[in-house]
Image (cartoon, grey):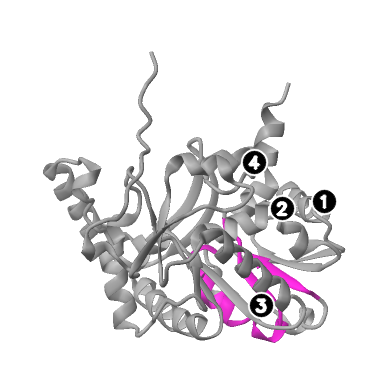
């Protein structure tokens, strides 16, 4: 029996969810398979997302080897950390008792500190943070200061997307208030949709970033995983790949020996979990684009995990994977 897809067109969310004034269709070239989700995103102006994406890639490519361009992603994990538990909306169809239980859990969780990470098919892939309750407040302060700086000099890739099936949009009202408190205004100059970064690093545009370039990777991967990521970058045309290993769950306190790499690399990709703002703040002397790649590192290490995140498997790869 054929089941009805839960995805269908949706124009907008209630007014209090509008982090930005306009809602546009989120379409990215080479990821047409994603169109079936009817994904929309909030934007500072009415723009064509395909044009917006192309201009974003052009800006990053233009900064290669010449300009410090910090790019920091904010998704549901960062929202949960920054904003705390936010009750699901009525669209989630969750009963009040479960709301109450999750609220109580959120009140007790800080007593045990912060632990974050990512999974695929119930398999743990990485840890992105393990900090005590006494450290969490300071980490939030770092985020606020770092994002203010990135908004002035770089790009915040926040996930402000939504469709008929709710995901992280219940964070939007609190995130809008958080931006206001920190005096951060998102514009076409300092903001792009979260998934632009995934698509840039996994779609055809990745060749423009890496072909003939010296790439610095800042990540906690070691052994076979590190080799797999290196081989993936070399396979995408990188002329050389160098590494700086950071801690898997305490990267907020890692010191990056930037002087060792300054003038020696053209682009930097990194994954540092909750510690990403502190890592980005140290990289200015590189004078190159510094891209918060996050989950893309897992895709480079094992393409099979791309099924866990949208916009990490371009149509050309998707078609090839099902070809006889």
Q: To which residue does mark 3 refer?
A: 256
Q: Nearer the viewer, mark 4 or mark 1?
A: 4
Q: Residue 272 sits in which quadrant?
A: bottom right
Residue contact at pointers 4 and 1, CB within 8 angstroms? no
The magenta stretch spans residue 230: no
Judge whether residue 27 can be spotted in this image.
Answer: yes
Q: Is residue 254 above or below residue 196?
A: below
Residue 204 numbered mark, or none = 2
For the N terminus, the quadrant is top left
Q: Is residue 129 above or below residue 257?
A: above
Q: Earlier in the sequence, mark 4 or mark 1?
A: 1
Q: Earlier in the sequence, mark 2 or mark 3?
A: 2
Separation (CA) of disc 2 from disc 4 = 10 Å
* Local crowd size for mark 1, using a 10 Å CA cut-off: few (<14), some (14–19), many (≥20): few
Q: To which residue does mark 4 refer?
A: 315
For the C terminus, the quadrant is top right
Task: State the residue in front, 288 or 251.
Answer: 288
Tell me which residue sits at (53%, 77%) in the image: 278
Separation (CA) of disc 3 from disc 1 = 26 Å
Q: Is residue 249 above or below residue 7?
A: below
Q: Earlier in the sequence, mark 2 or mark 1?
A: 2
Query: Does 264 sit left or right of 92 as displayed?
Result: right
Q: To which residue does mark 1 refer?
A: 235
Region in magenta:
265-294
Separation (CA) of disc 3 from disc 4 = 36 Å
Separation (CA) of disc 2 from disc 1 = 13 Å
Query: Does 262 sit left or right of 322 as displayed?
Result: right
Residue 119: x and y, percent? 50, 44
């Amino acid at each position: 029996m054929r089941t009805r897809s839960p995805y269908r067109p949706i124009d907008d969310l209630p007014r209090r969810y509008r982090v930005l004034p306009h809602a546009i269709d989120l379409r990215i070239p080479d990821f047409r398979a994603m169109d079936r989700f009817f994904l929309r995103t909030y934007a500072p102006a009415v723009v064509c997302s395909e044009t917006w994406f192309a201009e974003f890639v052009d800006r990053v490519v233009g900064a290669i080897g010449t300009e410090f361009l910090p790019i920091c992603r904010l998704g549901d994990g960062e929202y949960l950390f920054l904003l705390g538990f936010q009750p699901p909306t009525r669209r989630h169809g969750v009963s009040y008792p479960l709301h109450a239980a999750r609220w109580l859990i959120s009140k007790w969780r800080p007593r045990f500190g912060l632990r974050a990470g990512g999974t695929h098919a119930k398999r743990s892939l990485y840890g992105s943070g393990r900090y005590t309750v006494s450290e969490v407040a300071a980490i939030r302060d770092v985020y606020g200061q770092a994002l203010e700086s990135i908004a002035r000099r770089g790009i915040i890739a926040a996930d402000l997307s939504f469709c008929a099936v709710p995901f992280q949009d219940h964070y939007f009202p609190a995130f809008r208030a958080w931006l206001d408190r920190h005096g951060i205004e998102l514009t076409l100059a300092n903001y792009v949709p979260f998934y632009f970064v995934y698509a840039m690093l996994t779609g055809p545009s990745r060749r423009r970033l890496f072909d003939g370039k010296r790439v610095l990777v800042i990540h906690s991967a070691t052994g076979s995983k590190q080799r797999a990521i290196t081989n993936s970058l070399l396979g995408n045309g990188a002329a050389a790949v160098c590494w700086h290993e950071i801690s898997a769950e305490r990267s907020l306190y890692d010191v990056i020996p930037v002087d060792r790499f300054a003038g020696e690399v053209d682009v930097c990709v990194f994954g540092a979990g909750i510690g990403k703002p502190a890592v980005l703040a140290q990289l200015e002397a590189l004078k190159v684009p510094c891209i918060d790649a996050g989950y893309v590192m897992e895709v480079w290490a094992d393409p099979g995990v791309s099924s866990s995140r949208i916009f990490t498997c371009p149509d050309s790869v998707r078609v090839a994977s099902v070809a006889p």
